[in-house]
């Protein structure tokens, strides 16, 4: 038996209608949300860098000889490095990198925007993880 004996299937007919005002509003909301994602990531990085700075300042005030202890104790050194790397990475989220794109191409602009979001999100997540690891190490040090 061959496939030629089967009658050809017709593609389904799709009935479309004009989007109502509510659907248009939601599409506009989604577009605006996507466009403002880098700003939101930068706001989160500003908040995180503030929290890192405040917690580091408080800890250094309570334990002023931490830098001397870091020379003798690898745990203190790991805490300081994690804290400082976390702060540095949170600043990288705010740092305006040079992005290359074709100005007259909306596809190029969208790809650059998506790449920007991905880069900023990775820096922010790495910063958060390093900050949390510094806090965990600090807890281990205080308990132990």
Image (spheres, grey):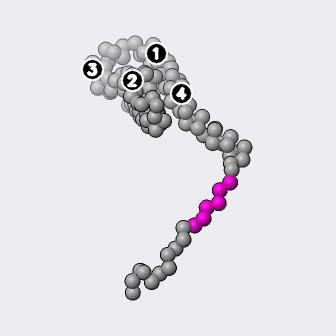
**Residue 17, quarter of picture:** bottom right
Circles 1 and 2, Cβ within 8 Å, touching? The answer is no
Compared to 66, does 20 lie above or below? below
Q: CA distance from mark 3 to mark 1?
A: 21 Å
Of labels 1 and 2, earlier in sequence is 1
Which disc is residue 72 wearing? Answer: 3
- Residue at 55 percent across and 33 percent down: it is 35
Which residue position is annotated with label 1?
57
Compare residues 126 and 113 and report the one nearer the observer. 113
Which residue position is annotated with label 4?
39
* Left or right of 122 on screen, residue 13: right
Of labels 4 and 2, earlier in sequence is 4
Compare residues 76 and 33 and report the one nearer the observer. 33
Compare residues 56 and 93 and report the one nearer the observer. 93
Query: Which type of secondary structure does the marked residue at label 3 adopt?
Result: helix
Q: CA distance from mark 4 to mark 2?
A: 16 Å
Q: Nearer the viewer, mark 3 or mark 1?
A: 1
Q: Which residues are magenta?
A: 12-17
Q: CA distance from mark 1 to mark 2?
A: 32 Å
Q: Nearer the viewer, mark 4 or mark 1?
A: 4
Circles 3 and 1, Cβ within 8 Å, touching? The answer is no
Compare residues 144 and 95 and report the one nearer the observer. 95
């Amino acid at each position: 038996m061959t496939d030629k004996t089967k009658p050809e299937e017709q593609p389904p007919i799709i009935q479309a209608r004009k989007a109502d005002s509510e659907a248009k509003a939601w599409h506009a909301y989604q577009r605006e949300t996507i466009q403002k994602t880098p700003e939101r990531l930068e706001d989160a990085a500003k908040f995180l860098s503030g929290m890192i700075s405040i917690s580091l300042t408080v800890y250094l005030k309570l334990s002023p000889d931490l830098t001397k202890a870091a020379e003798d104790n690898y745990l203190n050194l790991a805490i300081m490095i994690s804290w400082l790397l976390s702060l540095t990475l949170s600043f990288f989220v705010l740092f305006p990198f040079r992005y290359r794109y074709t100005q007259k191409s909306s596809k190029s602009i969208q790809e650059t925007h998506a790449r920007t979001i991905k880069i900023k999100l990775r820096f922010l997540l790495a910063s958060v993880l390093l900050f949390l690891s510094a806090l965990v190490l600090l807890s281990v040090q205080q308990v132990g």
